[in-house]
Image: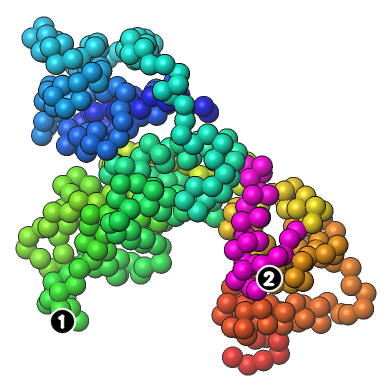
Amino acid sequence: MELKKENLLIVDDNFDMLEVLHRNLKAMNFHAFKASTVTEALNILLYTPIDLIITDLQMPGGSGLELLDYVNKNNPGLPSLIITGFPSIESAMQASRLGAQDYLTKPFTNQELKKAVSNILARQHKSPKEKVSKVSKVNSYAGMVGNSKAFENLIDMIERVKNNRATVLITGESGTGKELVARAIHYSGAFAADPFVAVNCAAIPESLIESELFGYVKGAFSGADQTRKGLFESANGGTIFLDEIGTMPHNVQSRLLRVLQEKEIRKIGAQNSDKINLRIIAATNENLPMLITQQKFREDLYYRLNVVALQTVPLRHRKVDIPLLVNAFLKKYGKEYGKPHIAIGEEALDLLVSYSWPGNVRELENAVQRMIIMGNDAIGVNEVNFLQDNIRHDSIENDLLPLQDVEREYILKVLAAVGNNKTKAAEILQINRKTLAAKLGQKL
């Protein structure tokens, strides 16, 4: 999908309305930010160029008219579209005085929304030159590599969100680089000098995750002999990345919802809460809407997290990027393993491109790493032999040695390449240390 270059901001305290508007605007190929309060909207406006505001009038904690008043004073000329379920001549006139371009009464049809948005943007008379993407034909960006349309679209989305604290939800298959995307958002944006804290929610025991995230005060529980700050406090001012968010326990989900709503945290055992100012980026390879139906994930938390949605694309859907990725991994691991001039032949590269890569970029990286370990300083005509059985379509032909000896020789080569580090060798071979020892006929 080719996104239009306009950035739209939707402001409404009704999550259902937010989702409907976002879905409809997405169908029109617009990128839209979502805010459920005026405060969230102002935070987005502070760092992000917005071309049109679509706002409700009556909201708790600040009205749409107050938002328009701010915009009129600080960003004159920014158009706005009012949507309201409580129309009045007085509010319509006041909104018009504050620069509102149009006024829709709920409920309205998708065609009415499309017509209003199109008319407002058409009146802005922006030339095509102003709308040229900054990321056209990008080959690399913040440690990520690619030149496919899917890659360009992803970078375009990152460019739109990197300079504000809007909450981001990254979805996609395992191995597609969700943490890389989160780091790109942080380190390429306005808050790059502030902390970036990555948390794998699935890796923290359920009994510890609450204290790890929120911290605790001295005496809060047995063993709490001193006050300790949590990961949210460590990330204050910057970004916290919550990976595998779908595994978060229900009680911790409730506390996270309060962080998103109130912008404050309370340590375990504390009487008072502390204000924080950070950006939350969450990621998952699970289907959160399905988890909601199974009552394993809070629906209100999902809507709070899904302010800006990014989706990473499986490698099988962007095969044009594989040669670039292979080249990047050759340079990275060639240098690490003392083979800086190592290259790959055309036949092996063709096999890599044709493979389906169920493990995505992570699997490709491991495959290239193994090829470098097994290959000579410059991979020669037999480089295909260094690919795994599941990647190449022909089995390894070796009539001279039994399979067990071939396997042992392979393992010994890997061990030699990593300085006999059994833990690292087992990781590269994708087996555990016990299995590694058994294959070598050794005891742990």
Colour pattern of the rendering: rainbow
> For numbered disc 2, what is the local secondary structure?
loop
What is the total number of numbered labels drawn onto the structure image? 2
Q: Is residue 94 above or below residue 373?
A: above
The residue sitting at 32% across, 23% down in the picture is 51
- Depth check: give the residue in front, 82 or 267: 82
Question: Mainly helix, strand or loop, the magenta region?
Answer: helix
The residue most toward the top is 89
In the image, what residue occupies the spot 72% across and 79% down? 413
Q: Residue at x 81, y 61 (%)?
A: 384
* Front position in the image: 354 or 36: 354
Q: Nearer the viewer, residue 297 or 172?
A: 172
Spot occupied by residue 78 in the image (x, y as percentages of width and height): 25, 21
**Left or right of 343 on screen, residue 68:** left
How many C-alpha atoms fall within 10 Å of the one at disc 2: few (<14), some, or many (≥20)? some
Rendering coords of residue 232 (x, y %): 24, 60
On the rendered structure, is 127 left or right of 34?
Answer: right
Relative to 84, residue 240 above or below: below
**Which comes sooner in the sequence, label 2 or label 1?**
1
Magenta residue span? 318-344
Alpha-carbon span between mark 2 and mark 1: 51 Å
Return the residue at label 2: 339
